[in-house]
Amino acid sequence: MLEIKNLHAEVDGKSILKGIDLNINKGEVHAIMGPNGSGKSTLANVLAGRDDYDITEGSVSFDGKDISELEPEERAGEGIFLAFQYPVEIPGVTNTTFLKEALNAQRKYRGEEELGGMEFVKLIRSKTKELGIKDDMLKRAVNVGFSGGEKKRNDILQMAVLNPKLAVLDETDSGLDIDALKIVAEGVNKLRAENNAILVITHYQRLLNYIVPDKVHVLAHGKIQRTGGKELALELEEKGYAGYSGEAA
Amino acid sequence: MVTLSSDKEAFIAQYDQSKDHLPGSDIAWLAELRAKNIALFEEVGLPTGKTELWKFTNLNPLKKQAFSPPSLEETIFANSNELPRLLEEGSSHRLVFIDGHYSADLSDDKLPSGVSLQSLSSVISAGAIGLEASIVPRERQEEQPLVALNTALMSDGYVLNISKDVSVDRPIEILHFGGGKAEQSYHNRNVISVASGSKVTIIENVTDRNDNVYFSNSVTEVSVGENATLHHYRVQASNKAAFLVSSTEAVVNKGASYDSFLLNTGARLSRTETNVSLIAENSSCHLNGAYMGTDDQHCDITTRVDHKSPHTTCDEVIKGVLGGKARGVFQGKIIVHELAQKTVGNQSHRAMLLSERAEVDVKPELEIFADDVICSHGCTSGQIDKEQLFYLRSRGLSTDQAQALLVNAFLAEAVDAVQNEGLKDLLLVRISDWLEQNPN
């Protein structure tokens, strides 16, 4: 589904990713772990198409299509979703309005019919119920006045409604206490399916206790240094990233 | 009719030419008032950038046009359904002005009891009884040459009186429909008097039927009696060739409230000036508004609030969005006089610039002569937040869609101040329509 080959990228002219190779298949959950400054968040932002993150070499293809030149909204339409490390507050725009506009924009991109009011309400109700989110959250402005945990849950709700093929969770665990972490992880697990894939980016192993990955990659100095099963995360938890910090980029 | 270019001399010539035909030319005090005012106008001239109050708004584009007085010919509208309305039919009392002239035929004839409405021309032709007290010279009249020009040339307008303790059931919607002929100028004079204990909503709809250039220079004198409330809303959506200058002066009595809102999307150049005097305890005013500009539009909102008595309150929230080469101006003066202890005055102006060539100039001024007051002002301007834009785009919205959503939310917050739900909904629609037509 996602095929990254020899990916080099820079931010503001500074080289951050220095040759990443990564393949993720349908139904798989991959985790990328690494020390601060290793390029984890850069990878997430490059995949989502943020401005100022430039691919200088290599390729990113998604379902066989080169996405490196696509706009962020086109990537969303293709089925890529980024759960933000810090979800953004949008004053004056309710969650419902936002979700409806986003969903219909994606459907339009894919040549699908846009959802009418009733159909949309039905869909959104089923998702809030599934995730145990109160309906009054829908009437609130996007992330405004939300606690850290609420913001992350809101991102998961968006993910549930938009139903992406690939969800990239960028340090979703940062700023969450253990209870909030569990709730968010539960939400993610409910969305795991044969047809979609999840890429979890995290510094710490603890999130992976709840979202159990099929594969774990260690990212350092802009390159994937090692790949293993879920046990690799436990090893990192025990030994830290010390073994990777000395390696040449 | 001879048309003239519109520098100072042209307006004076227009006065000289028409003074014997202007309404009330046979009424001594009125003729004298006009003569005094044209003399004042002659002395001061059209405002220029050298005048502090007109520092950011340049009337030179006006001078390039040649304006003639409005013609008195019959209107071409067979019935009022052809005319735009803001509120749905039946939910307002509507008055119609076509090219500056009051049209009795096109206006609703039944007004509720306690509401008296006459056109200025009919008041004058009936001897101008009671009018003298309503158009007394303003304080600082030498700073307001366009008010003097209006006084010299005024030919129509409305005189609205609400009797004591009347709650007017429906808003009074006043349509100012311009542009009938190119290069006309209208100098309308309006008087609104709300007697004690009354409540009324007035909605002025300033628009037109084509792209003709015209110059509207209107003056409105407002008095709000004890414990009365006036909601005074103004929607200016005229074409992008028009010049709209208006000056409203409101005197607010004990326990009374003057609540105004302006939505401005129109005009090549607009200057909307509102001066409020809070003259007795517990009087208050709200001067809110939202404006949008594009291309080379110029939108100036100038306000002055005089707190002349203790325990007076004013709130002012104005938001603007500018694209193209548009320019916004906000000047807000709050003066707390020595007597006016326990005054509360809050003012904020926020502008969002959608293009690099758009510009906004602001001049907030607080002059405080009392020591026990709470006053604040804040002015900000900036671009659309990039993080917000990326967040929305990462969920599938195009840049235009995301921008429209953000700008809409930004302006909607200002519209929230409007108390009439029907009008509020309509203003929100106007905002989204504008954004659709002007993605910038």
Image (tube, rainbow, N blue to C red):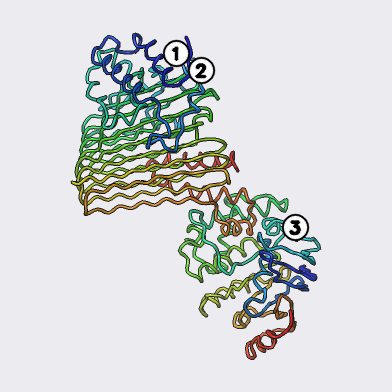
Q: Amino acid at mark 2?
A: Lys
Marks 3 and 1 in Cβ contact (< 8 Å) = no
Marks 2 and 3 in Cβ contact (< 8 Å) = no
Q: Which residue is mark 2?
A: B181
Q: CA distance from mark 2 to mark 3?
A: 53 Å
Q: Mark 1 or 2 closer to N-term?
A: 1
Q: Secondary structure at mark 2?
A: loop
Is disc 3 in the same subunit as disc 1?
A: no
* Residue drawn at (56%, 39%) of the image: B325
Residue B309, position as x, y percentages in the image:
20, 44
Classify 10 Å Cα crowding around label 2: few (below 14), some (14-19), many (20 and above): some
Q: Is residue A107 above or below residue B331?
A: below
Residue sitting nearer the eye, A243 or B190: A243
Residue sitting nearer the eye, A45 or B18: B18
| Quarter of the image where one finds residue B211 | top right
Is disc 2 in the same subunit as disc 3?
A: no
Q: Is residue B101 above or below residue B266?
A: above
Marks 1 and 2 in Cβ contact (< 8 Å) = yes
| Residue closest to the far bottom | A238
| Quarter of the image where one finds residue B235 | top left
What label sits on residue A138 in the rendered view? none
Q: Chain of mark 1?
A: B
Q: Which residue is mark 1?
A: B71
Q: Is residue B45 left or right of residue A110?
A: left
Q: Secondary structure at mark 1?
A: loop
Q: Which residue is mark 3?
A: A69
Q: Amino acid at mark 1?
A: Ser
Q: Amino acid at mark 3?
A: Glu
Residue A188, position as x, y percentages in the image:
62, 72
Residue B238, position as x, y percentages in the image:
49, 30
Is disc 1 in the same subunit as disc 2?
A: yes
